[in-house]
Image: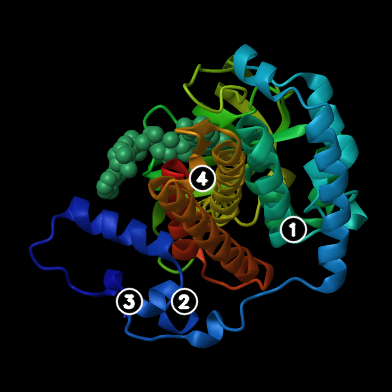
């Protein structure tokens, strides 16, 4: 039974509200739960993990061709060191990634993309992560969260209007976080309401940390919306997601970036919305379903961030293996010392585990499993921590 339906004795109103919000975020009831949530209910659903999910042969071969072209570019042209030093990814490098097809690789072919699946997408992100962490994050923010809501929840008109552009022309950005809103995504302070004539939504508020916000041609924006619950007739605060473009009057990207100690080539913008008139047809999914929209997109982002870290860890291991074979101390290569061998073995084990977990989870996404929130979260934590250890 849903916790929200129980009488919670001795639980403050504030904590009850937090439990209700978390319940909405946690998703389905037991019969639709994913593998990990099932474990918490004492059920081992081996049918959800065995056999290990695999792409089709055709999908793998198509991705292999993209990977070969991309690696050629990354090895010979991509300015990874300058990107980190200058805290900037040059426009030409972003354009090259559009040309190769990377920026639209998961967008269906009928909208100008390559139509590849989530596993292929993460293989590409792992390859980019080997060369440049900043570029991996920019590609991920664009396709996993920036325009993902249009792919998943967009109307046919929205898809036709925006997907060919985000596949071939410009970046997209995701605007959920705010000065006072981080982990508590439901606590949006940006507000959206219907205009008096009913033709528009009016958007007011401030967003923070929006990756590539200063470079993007389109934003997915989440905002608090007072709407009437059709069942109870009560007016409630919900979250609604809309498509906003930077050319709309009242959109002000007032800070393009904030320096960081890692992934320095990525830019996180601060954006102010002042009485922005958002056309009604820019609604994503349904009014009041914006939290759903945001959290679904974040599932994809968690995997690609894991893939980027995994790629970096593979690169670190390969470099370490080369080094211990060619560096001599005490008249022998470092590789002959048992302690060094142990370290390399541990790196290999961590990388193997990251690979196994990542592609298990992307396989679940490719199968369109309903509930993969905990799996993607575990993957992100595990890969970040193991990547750091490697
Ligand atoms: C490089 C980068 C890129 C980003 N890109 C985007 C983007 O494109 N779009 C976007 O909308 N946002 C983006 N973000 C924002 C990111 O989503 C937030 O940083 C994240 O949601 C966490 O929020 P916060 O940093 O405000 O931390 P807070 O929510 O303030 O949390 C601070 C600390 O408290 C802990 N904490 C919070 N609540 C709890 C709890 N209930 N129980 C236990 N511990 C808790 C957290 O784990 C954390 O350690 C980006 C951030 C970074 C750093």
> CA–CA distance between discs 4 and 2?
40 Å
State yes or no: discs 4 and 3 in contact (Cβ < 8 Å): no
The residue carrying mark 3 is 40
Rendering quarter of residue 64:
bottom right
Which of 226 and 190 lies nearest the eye of the viewer? Answer: 190
Dot 1 or dot 3, earlier in sequence = 3
> CA–CA distance between discs 1 and 4?
34 Å
Q: Is residue 55 visible?
A: yes
- Camera-near label (1 vs 2) is 1
**SS of the residue at dot 3?**
helix
**What is the x, y in percent for residue 43?**
38, 86
- Camera-near label (4 vs 2) is 4
> CA–CA distance between discs 1 and 2?
22 Å
Which of 79 and 270 lies nearest the eye of the viewer? Answer: 79
Rendering quarter of residue 72:
top right
Residue 306: mark = none
Dot 1 or dot 2, earlier in sequence = 2
Is residue 203 found left or right of 340 in the rendered image? right
**SS of the residue at dot 1?**
helix
- Camera-near label (4 vs 3) is 4
- Label 4: few (<14), some (14–19) or many (≥20) C-alpha neighbours in 10 Å: many
The residue carrying mark 4 is 335
Color scheme of the displayed model:
rainbow
Dot 1 or dot 4, earlier in sequence = 1
Q: Residue furthest left?
A: 10
The residue carrying mark 1 is 120
The residue carrying mark 2 is 35
Dot 2 or dot 3, earlier in sequence = 2
Q: Quadrant of the N terminus?
A: bottom left
**What is the x, y in percent for residue 146?**
66, 41
Which of 50 and 313 lies nearest the eye of the viewer? Answer: 313
**What is the x, y in percent for residue 278?**
67, 35
């Amino acid at each position: 039974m849903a916790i929200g339906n129980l009488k919670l004795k001795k639980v403050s109103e504030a904590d009850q509200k937090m439990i209700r919000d978390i319940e909405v975020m946690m998703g389905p009831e037991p019969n639709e739960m994913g593998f990990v949530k099932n474990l918490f209910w004492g059920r081992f659903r081996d049918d959800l993990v065995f056999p290990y999910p695999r792409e089709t042969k055709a999908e793998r071969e198509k991705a292999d061709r993209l990977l070969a072209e991309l690696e050629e570019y990354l090895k010979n042209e991509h300015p990874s060191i300058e990107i980190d030093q200058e805290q900037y990814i040059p426009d030409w490098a972003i354009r090259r990634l559009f040309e190769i097809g990377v920026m639209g690789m998961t967008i269906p072919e009928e909208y100008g993309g390559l139509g590849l699946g989530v596993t292929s997408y993460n293989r590409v992100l792992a390859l980019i992560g080997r060369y440049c962490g900043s570029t991996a994050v920019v590609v991920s923010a664009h396709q996993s969260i920036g325009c993902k809501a249009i792919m998943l929840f967009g109307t046919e008109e929205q898809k036709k209007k925006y997907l060919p552009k985000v596949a071939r022309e410009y970046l997209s950005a995701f605007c959920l976080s705010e000065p006072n809103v981080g982990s508590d995504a439901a606590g949006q302070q940006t507000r959206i309401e219907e205009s008096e004539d009913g033709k528009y939504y009016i958007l007011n508020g401030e967003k923070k940390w929006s990756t590539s916000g200063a470079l993007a041609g389109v934003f997915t924006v989440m905002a608090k919306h007072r709407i009437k619950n059709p069942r109870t007739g009560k007016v409630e605060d919900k979250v609604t997601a809309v498509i906003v473009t930077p050319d709309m009057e009242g959109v002000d990207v007032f800070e393009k970036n904030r320096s960081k100690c890692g992934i320095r080539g990525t830019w996180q913008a601060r954006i102010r919305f002042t009485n922005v008139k958002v056309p009604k047809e820019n609604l994503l999914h349904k009014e009041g379903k914006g939290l759903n929209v945001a959290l679904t997109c974040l599932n994809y982002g968690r995997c690609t961030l894991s893939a980027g870290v995994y790629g970096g860890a593979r690169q670190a291991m390969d470099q370490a293996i080369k080094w211990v074979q060619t560096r001599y101390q005490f008249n022998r290569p470092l590789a002959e010392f048992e302690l060094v061998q142990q370290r390399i073995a541990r790196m290999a084990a961590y990388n193997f585990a990251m690979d196994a977990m990542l592609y298990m989870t992307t396989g679940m996404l490719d199968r369109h499993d309903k509930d993969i929130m905990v799996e993607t979260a575990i993957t992100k934590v595990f890969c970040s921590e193991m990547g750091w250890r490697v």
